[in-house]
Image: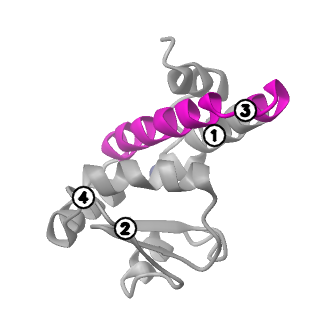
Amino acid sequence: MEIIIHKHLPFWFWIVKMKWPSIPLDRVIVAWGSDCYTNSFISPDKVIHESVHHKQQHYSKIYGIYWWIKYLLLKDFRFSQEVEAYRKEYQWVNSQKFSRQIKFEALMEMSKHLSSEFYGNMVKQEVALNIIKNVL
Ligand SMILES: [Zn+2]
């Protein structure tokens, strides 16, 4: 599926901003249908991560609206969708010829995000780390 990248955020992003006022507008990436929105550059690992969200939305903007409403309102749903995306991202990082240090730092960064307030403080970082590695 071809993903179109837009160098701006979607028009409805203010709704997300209302839920998370401190969300970094210069770094956030939004998947909607088969369109991807960001004010910044998307690194290859994030392309992999977002590709999971596009797939979860069946590459459809209509289904994507339903997905985003659930994502915003239900923290269990949000967490489940992110676990899938971070696992895929981690598998990609791990398959690359990066040093062990780089792979470890990437895993730490991912587990920090997954355990953060943004995803509803669902788990502690150590648990998030094992969930991403898929060893639990
Ligand atoms: Zn995500």
Which mark's residue is nearer the viewer, 3 or 2?
A: 3
x, y percent for residue 70: 26, 55
Residue annotated with mark 2: 3
Disc with the residue nearer the chain's start (3 vs 4): 4
Residue annotated with mark 3: 97
Disc with the residue nearer the chain's start (2 vs 1): 2
Residue annotated with mark 4: 67
Q: Are marks 3 and 4 in contact (CB under 8 Å)?
A: no
Dot 1 alpha-carbon crowd within 10 angstroms: few under 14, some 14 to 19, many 20 or more = many
Numbered label attached to residue 16: none
Classify residue 127 as left or right of residue 59: right
Q: Is residue 83 magenta?
A: yes
Q: Is residue 99 magenta?
A: yes
Q: Amino acid at mark 1?
A: Met
Q: Which secondary structure lies at badge 3? A: loop
Identify the residue at horizontal 29%, vertical 63% (top origin): 68
Magenta-drawn segment = 75-104
- The residue at the far top in this view is 136
- The residue at the far front in this view is 97
Residue 24's image quarter?
Answer: bottom right
Disc with the residue nearer the chain's start (3 vs 1): 3
Cα–Cα span, label 3 and label 1: 19 Å
Identify the residue at horizontal 15%, vertical 70% (top origin): 62
Cα–Cα span, label 3 and label 2: 26 Å
Cα–Cα span, label 2 and label 1: 23 Å
Which mark's residue is nearer the viewer, 4 or 2?
A: 2
Residue annotated with mark 1: 110
